[in-house]
Image (cartoon, rainbow, N blue to C red):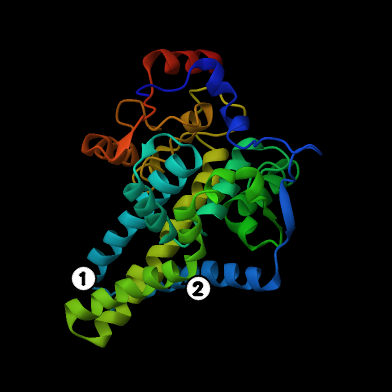
Amino acid sequence: MSSSLTSETAETTETAETTETAKPGGPKPITIGPSSKTDQILVNTFVTVPFLALIAAVPLAWGWGLSWLDVGIALGFYLVSGLGVTVGLHRYFTHRSFTANRGLRIALGIAGSLALQGDVITWVADHRRHHAFSDKEGDPHSPWLSGPGAAGLAKGFVHAHMGWVYEPRAHTNADRFAPDLIADRDINRISALFPLWTVVSLLGPALLGGLLSMSWWGALTALFWAGFVRVAVLHHVTWSINSICHIVGNRPYASRDRSTNVWPLAVLSFGESWHNLHHADPTCARHGVGRGQVDSSARVIWVFEKLGWASQVRWPTTRRLEMLAARSR
């Protein structure tokens, strides 16, 4: 399929993507059980430690402990893990914006796991739930559900950005929101190996830094900059889409929520901050469709298509964009 969805189909995408065949007794529950204390401790640790490293990075950057080797390794891992999130976890696994061959599917699953934002199945289940209830009760990270006025919005921003990660909460029910991935043996294996990808994501840079500099100091600084700091930066860029891109920005296309476009985030987020079109047409492979709207994730998908690794890419069409723009007026 070389074009985006038809009008009628696209309007129901957000619901259809998160609905499975109902059981005789009714639909499956949205969440399943509370998070265990162990789960909460692990999540808090892997969010807090990189965040503290990011705070410490500011004074450390001034003349101590940062080399061009660290910068190069950090950029390399940021590209791989960041595109693993945007092209892999988001546009492919969550929204099926294209079809990938088995090799690419496995590579995208591993690359997305290196971002340390959770295993593939959990990430996809949470995000499909977000689309099913975007900015309404049931959305795991809407900034608009924390009360009225400026105080409510401030509280909502904190919740949408990173508070929802820390808050004890029930797990999103993957049986309801990601049954296709549960049935995929390769993705099940990759998700089960998330602890391994965590080790690779942090110690991989350290190993490279140590080998290329031939020093333990090179390994330590690479662990800090290309491991912890890189993970923290990508965390906050991703979370900014959840928070900032649902509060401020322009809304040129009709959607059922408050999603917006925020251009300053476009480069760091690989095009994810053109968030309004994404919510207006979730399965579209390209989010930045206007002149000058940088969307490097879409370019990567285009390369995969040319190489024959991806097919049936749902590219936007002029007619579809005009229809969505007209509805927003």
Residue 147, horizontal then vertical, whole percent? 75, 44
Residue 182 lies, with reference to residue 275, above or below; the image says below
Dot 1: what SS? helix
Mark 1 residue crowding within 10 angstroms, few (<14) / some (14–19) / many (20+) = some
The type of residue carrying mark 1 is: Leu
Query: Does the rendering let one see residue 294?
Result: no
The residue that label 1 is drawn on is 69
Mark 2 residue crowding within 10 angstroms, few (<14) / some (14–19) / many (20+) = some
Residue 215, horizontal then vertical, whole percent? 21, 86
Residue 172 lies, with reference to residue 219, above or below; the image says above
Q: Which residue is nearer to you in this view: 3 or 52?
A: 3
The type of residue carrying mark 2 is: Val
Marking on residue 49: 2
**Could you tell me which residue is drawn at 41 percent across and 73 percent down?**
199
User: Quick check: 234 left or right of 243?
Assistant: left
Residue 253, horizontal then vertical, whole percent? 50, 23
* Quadrant for the C terminus in the image: top right
Query: Does the rendering let one see residue 314?
Result: yes
